[in-house]
């Protein structure tokens, strides 16, 4: 039974102004999409991170679907992406008819192994979708170089990567989501800043700018109409209703105003986890997350890599007994019921390894320093005494 | 310039409990989709209207996309639908590769002409999508009969049709959205009950029940997992993130609690418009909406049909001068920039007629009886004195 001391895996953070802004939106008489708060959020992201153009969406899934439509993905096109990712990364492109070519993760961290991407490229390859797992950057210099040489598009699945950066070989630090031709963010309740469900498409290649607005507005040129560029708006392209309610945008805007304090707190907690668990006595059972030199950490997630699935299962149980809720994910997509028969048969050992051994610990704004100490104590005791 | 007396075309209605429920959702620690308020809304609709299964979506567009996926619409399939409809009706099926076969509207009202549907059916036809324009029922007995004889699916685009009914030849009254195999509703801010953006898929054919949940949850069997029917959830089908945030669902639930009083007020206003404008002296310029004997009116919309486009343009201007905002829609989809080259060349005279002559008057909960009188006075004067 869960006592009052129960620590959930996640708890949504409320900045305090969410309902004030929602009320303001309702009072204004405009709560459908693309209103005041949508614009405030989009401007905020464009100004803070230098994204060329931002469009709020109802989910990161929807932002990825917009990317697939913008890239004109069609039956027979191949898209390279990691197997260790959320289903939406793949679904968005499968919905347009793409064949997914799954790449393996690196040995030392879950992000895709850039050194082995090039062997997966064929004349049918259209795009590489990188996933910045846990908000930790993929090696974007290497990826953009490959993409440029093979004339491929790059989509950053930056679902977990808000306020995270990549440090290039030239020393220049770039926000994740600003490097690929397109990028997708999530504001799902488990993310650093949230709106329950929610997401955003980032357009960095200006050639996609006009069409991105059209696809966002159900395939109509409504945005151009409101700017007075056309005298009526019409059905000019495929598209969907990708834009969220102003209620959702108002909620998100209240979060953005607190982004810096949220990030400060999350980083504090993340570093505590890292320091308390970086202990050679624990290494036979658990490994710490690895952050490459080119990656900044946005403290989206604190994960451990267990030595095997039994250790992970046992550790989840032990944490649960102490009222701490830890979780695992993902199942490798190349082995999924939907895709294993379409997969080309390559073994993706690292992807399967993380599917079996990665464990996510509670990490949210209201988690206390004492909570982190308590969780780390349980884990330390488990690793030094358990006989799993 | 708009004075303080400006009457907008629409104003969102706030029941008063929206933010209380949103706060409750946030406090519960669960604001992503498929939580308490999503279930409350879905149960409400199932119980009130006898829908077999309801799934909230981020928009009616998304509900239509779910329908297209559930029907396995693929390249080459033909789908029959009216040309006088919102782009999403068509987009949802075009995204899956369908060829849209556009049907004309009836002479006496914008709904599709059932008597001419059968000539459009070919061996490639997979579904008929009916749109209950203005919440006024299509002739569902006739449509279901055609569909049954030709083994076609029927999707009700019930975007505007909440709380509206069809009265069958046998005298039995059925809620719109409960008759076709699938149905889609909208809770966009202009609808009778709202959540800014929002929608719902209704599954009436139980064979779609299990797959509808999977598609809704990004192609995973997560719903079955939470019911304990499978021990982990996996990627088993195509899908998307169709489910809205609990913030949106909480807002909608506050509206549902007031559905009866909202409907009462809207019907009062609608009947006032109808009575004040049903005057033979106005008939040379404007026609009243026609409600067939089998259709109940949910007072979603009060529209007029002008004698030609010039009258409509002039009437919009005159209303605007008096601070009343009226609007028109839709452009016939068969003539749209996206589709005119794919259309088979048939003229759809009635569709084009409504595109050119239909005018929507302000109609929302807070509109006053005096407002309606004032609007009708301007229209009456226009019709009896204007020389358009």
Image (spheres, coloured by chain):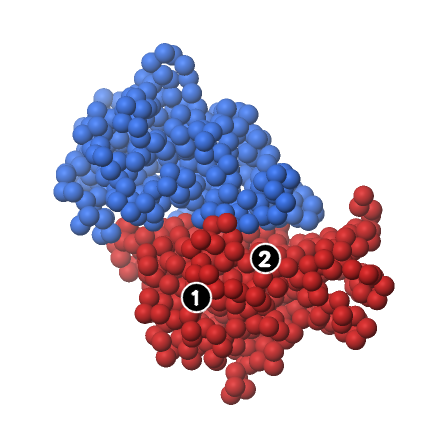
Chain colours: A red, B blue
Which SS class for mark 1?
A: strand
The alpha-carbon separation of the residues under discs 1 and 2 comes to: 18 Å
Picture coordinates of residue B298 (x, y %)? 41, 27
Q: Is residue B359 visible?
A: no
* Residue beneath the point at 36% across and 67% down: A125
In the rendered view, does A176 fall on the left or right side of A97? right
Above-or-below relation of A223 to B42:
below
Q: Quadrant of residue B252?
A: top right
Q: Chain of mark 1?
A: A
In the rendered view, does B365 fall on the left or right side of B308? right
Comes first in the chain, label 1 or label 2: 1
Above-or-below relation of A151 to A356:
below
* Residue beneath the point at 21% across and 28% down: B118
Label 2: which residue? A330
* Residue beneath the point at 74% across and 60% down: A311
Marks 1 and 2 on same chain: yes
Q: Which mark is residue B311?
A: none
Q: Which mark is residue A80?
A: 1
In the rendered view, does A309 fall on the left or right side of B283? right
Number of marks drawn: 2
Farthest residue in the top direction? Answer: B170
* Residue beneath the point at 53% across and 25% down: B48
Picture coordinates of residue A149 (x, y %)? 37, 79
Farthest residue in the bottom direction? Answer: A170
Picture coordinates of residue A113 (x, y %)? 52, 73
């Amino acid at each position: 039974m869960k006592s009052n001391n129960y620590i959930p895996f996640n708890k949504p953070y409320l900045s305090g102004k969410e309902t004030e802004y929602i009320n303001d939106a309702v009072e204004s008489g405009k709560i459908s999409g693309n209103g005041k708060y949508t614009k405030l959020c989009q401007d905020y992201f464009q100004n803070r991170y230098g994204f060329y153009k931002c469009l709020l969406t109802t989910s990161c899934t929807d932002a990825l679907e917009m990317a697939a439509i913008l890239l004109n993905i069609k039956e027979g096109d191949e898209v390279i992406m990691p197997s260790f990712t959320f289903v939406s990364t793949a679904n968005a492109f499968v919905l347009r008819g793409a064949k997914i070519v799954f790449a393996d993760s690196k040995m030392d961290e879950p992000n895709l192994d850039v050194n082995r991407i090039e062997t997966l490229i064929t004349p049918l390859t259209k795009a590489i979708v990188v996933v910045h797992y846990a908000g930790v950057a993929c090696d974007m210099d290497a990826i953009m170089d490959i993409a440029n040489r093979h004339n491929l598009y790059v989509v950053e699945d930056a679902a977990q990567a808000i306020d995270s950066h990549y440090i290039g070989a030239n020393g220049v630090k770039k926000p994740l989501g600003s490097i690929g031709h397109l990028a997708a963010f999530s504001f799902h309740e488990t993310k650093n800043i949230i709106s329950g469900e929610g997401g955003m498409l980032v357009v960095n290649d200006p050639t996609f700018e006009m069409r991105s607005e059209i696809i966002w507005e159900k395939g109509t040129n409504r945005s151009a109409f409101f700017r007075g560029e056309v005298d009526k708006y019409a059905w000019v392209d495929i598209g969907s209703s990708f834009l969220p309610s102003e209620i959702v945008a108002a909620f998100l805007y209240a979060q953005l105003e607190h982004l810096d304090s949220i990030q400060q707190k999350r980083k504090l907690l993340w570093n505590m986890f890292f320091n308390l668990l970086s202990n050679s006595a624990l290494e036979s059972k658990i490994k710490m997350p690895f952050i490459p030199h080119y990656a900044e950490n946005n403290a989206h997630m604190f994960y451990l890599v267990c030595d095997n699935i039994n250790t992970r299962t046992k550790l989840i149980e032990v944490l649960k007994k102490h009222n701490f809720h830890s979780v695992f994910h993902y199942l490798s997509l190349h082995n999924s019921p939907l895709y294993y028969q379409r997969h080309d048969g390559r073994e993706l050992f690292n992807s399967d390894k993380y599917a079996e051994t990665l464990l996510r610990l509670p990490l949210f704004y209201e988690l206390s320093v004492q909570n982190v100490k308590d969780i780390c104590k349980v884990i330390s005791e488990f690793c030094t005494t358990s006989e799993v």
